[in-house]
Image (cartoon, grey):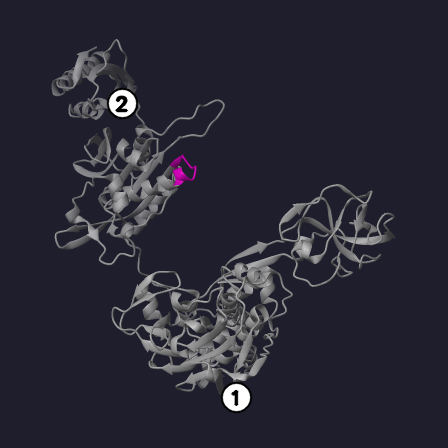
Amino acid sequence: MKIPLSWLKEYIDLNVTPAQIAKTLTMAGLEVDAVEKLGLGCEKIVVCKVLEVQKHPQADKLCLATVTDGQEAYQVVCGASNCRPGIKTALALVGSTVLDETGKPFKIKKTKIRGIESAGMLCAPQELGIEDQQEGIIEFAEHLKEGMDVAELYADFIFEISLTPNLGHCSSLIGVARELSAALCVPVRYPEIRVKEDSGKPAAKEVSIDIRSPEGCPRYACRVIKGITVKPSPDWLKRRLEASGIRSINNVVDVTNYVMLEMGHPLHAFDKEMLLGDSIVIREAQKGEHFVTLDEKERILNEGDLLICDREKPVALAGIMGGQNSEVSESTKNLVLEAAYFIPGAIRRTSKHLGLMTDASKRFERGTDPNILQQVLDRAAMLIHEVAGGEICSGVVDLALKTFPKHRIHCRLSRINKILGAHLSVSEVENTLQRLGLRFSWDGQDVFTVDIPTFRNDLHEEIDIIEEVARIYGFGNINKGTSRASPSVTPHAPIFLFEREIRSRLINEGLQELLTCDLIGPTLLNIIQESEMPEKLWVKVLNPTSIEQSVLRTSLLPGLLQAVKFNWDHQCHDIAGFEIGRIHFKEGEQYREQSMAGIILTGKSRSHHWDIKPKDYDFSDLKGILENLFDELKVSKIAFRPSRLKTLHPGRQASIFAGDLEIGSLGEVHPDVSRRLDVPQRILFAEINLHDLFPLKISLSRMQEIPMYPGSERDWTLTLKEEAPIVAILEAVKASNSRLLENVELLDLYRSEKLGPKLKNATFRFVYRDRKKTIAQETVDKEHARIVENVLKSITTLTGQNN
């Protein structure tokens, strides 16, 4: 709901800033989502003071005014009769923007008027877009300082407020004014309603009401207005509606919307000539009955849907939307103006099954005041007479099948203080109830008897009154006591602590945490094309809110790809992120979930620098992050072996093994997937099963003494086929079970045309050491030759030629 501050001030005097108003409303329970500032349609207009006025030598109706903006004096030609020395007015200098007679902006240019140069223009209210009937130039109060921006003086603010279902009484400007009145102790001004009726034309002779569904509509009232002229609304009405987020239609419909926003009760206007039999019938629809609403859509109704009809046909969906067959148009001359009280459940049921929610239905669903019908009809009739003319038939046709008395709630002072943990006095509670506009009596001992007005349909029990007292008294004013309850000593789940440790270590690697939804849908699945997990193992949602959230993810990859796509579309091309979350799948008849850690890299691994050139993330960057993680967790016997996952690039992927247990995978996302995402750069992804990794972590580590004796190094270059994995060489070396071999690592990879297109040279460095004595060169040579021979025997299918 949007509330313009300028309109709100008609009902309450507010001498606080818009930010303070927003805070006050939020603390009172009306959450303000946004405050939007609206300026005038003009620019660079300042307050000036008229210093001197002389007659124009060439024109009787013009004068020469000398004005100042506090810094400099200007001569301006002016034709206003109220231009005189001493007044403060609005000055538009050359280059400023004001409004012409049609409301369109135009710039002030340097010009001569009857031979005299004018340095600007003194502005009338209409030229600034200000609603003021004052003749001549605008006159400001004396206290305004010269040079002030006029736009700031007339700036408006729009409060966007979210209302919970229990705040139906706040769905109007008067409702919001009441809340501010209670919070700020400022009285509310209600609009003055004066209806000029034509006593010779009783409304009861023009229309009759027949309620056939009292369960849905216990009260219905209407007025009749004849001889109106339907035309566009005046500017003041258009501006207020548009500022409140409602499109202007015509003067009659706009008034009904205006009164709905002002007083909170929806109205509807019928073209009287379209109502057959001059009668209104409120009945329930038949199953399968059809009705065309104002939005030109045919609705198929259910049995029990509430309809407003004439003698032969439906003319409106009660409380939701009118019909095409009775709408107000330019040819409409006579009106039937409706105000009714509909039971909230009846409107909610129809609105939900039709998927049709309107401003009117929202208010009826939350509950309206059944005793305000005549007031809103009178207010609307008065305004329609003002903007559309016509004659208001005397009297209101009002059929109420039951009365709507105020109900009473007994509230104990002792209960208030016990619930709130406060020590409020009788006078403090009385003051709070008075500020809320609730009438009450006090029994002199403990009980308040509170009369609840019918517009407060959210107050039913004693606890509701206690909540109101707390809300207006201020939760911040209630002292917090010391809790006597001791906190739980239940320890954290080990996997939770492990997830927290992994999160910390990945952040230390320079990755940013990403959060994605557990639910995915066909769009993401189609992008990935083929899942590694069969569809029969997917967990599908029975009643998804959206088709794109209909399956629980079996991998973190879809959500992280979606994050990459979102960032790419918003010009963020470099991403280094991770997510720790759950995957879900079926195992037989059981549903399983496991904690996973996913890493996603794309774009540049370092930013531009004059010395070091930027570089794209590659497989080695991703593998290095994982190796660092495993080293910090003291996980041993980690191996990266070739894999064949369909979602990853066939030549740039690997499975991660800890001994014989596969704990994850890594690689470059398949180029087909990147193309479907429309992300034209390499994407790297790794996923680790934390449930499998957790038991491999070593919490305690033992110190190892520094070697006392020197080692000896040997390099070995081996020609391999291009597809040969380096890990196969390293595993073959380790399989030799050498007592003297301390370490072996890949030193270099070399490719060239001379070597051949399908071959590569891999250089390894071997470090030999005997921890009990200085190792002899002959011993090293012999051990090195033995290892090389064993490796060559075990990898005969991988080699090209031996160097």
- Whether 559 is drawn above or below 481: the answer is above
Residue 54 vs residue 635, the one in the foreground: 54
For this view, does 83 lie left or right of residue 573? right
Q: Residue 195: x, y in percent?
A: 58, 79
- Picture residue at 33% right of the left edge, 28% below the top: 618
The verdict on residue 570 being magenta is: yes
Is residue 678 visible in the rendered structure shown here? yes
Between disc 2 and disc 1, whose residue precedes?
Answer: 1
Does the CB distance between marks 2 and 1 fall below 8 Å? no
Residue 417 vs residue 467, the one in the foreground: 467
Q: How many marks?
A: 2
Between label 2 and label 1, give the one nearer the viewer: 1
| Identity, as a three-letter code, of the amino acid under mark 2 | Glu
Give the magenta range.
567-575
For disc 1, the neighbor class at 10 Å (few under 14, some 14 to 19, many from 20) is: some
Q: Residue 723: x, y in percent?
A: 20, 22
Task: Identify residue for label 2.
Answer: 745
The verdict on residue 365 being magenta is: no
Measure the alpha-carbon separation of dots 2 and 1.
89 Å
| Identity, as a three-letter code, of the amino acid under mark 1 | Trp
Dot 2 falls on a residue whose secondary structure is: strand
- Picture residue at 21% right of the left edge, 36% below the top: 658
Label drawn at residue 442: 1
For this view, does 391 lie left or right of residue 752? right
- Picture residue at 38% right of the left edge, 42% below the top: 566
Q: Residue 279: x, y in percent?
A: 40, 79
Residue 668 vs residue 492, the one in the foreground: 668
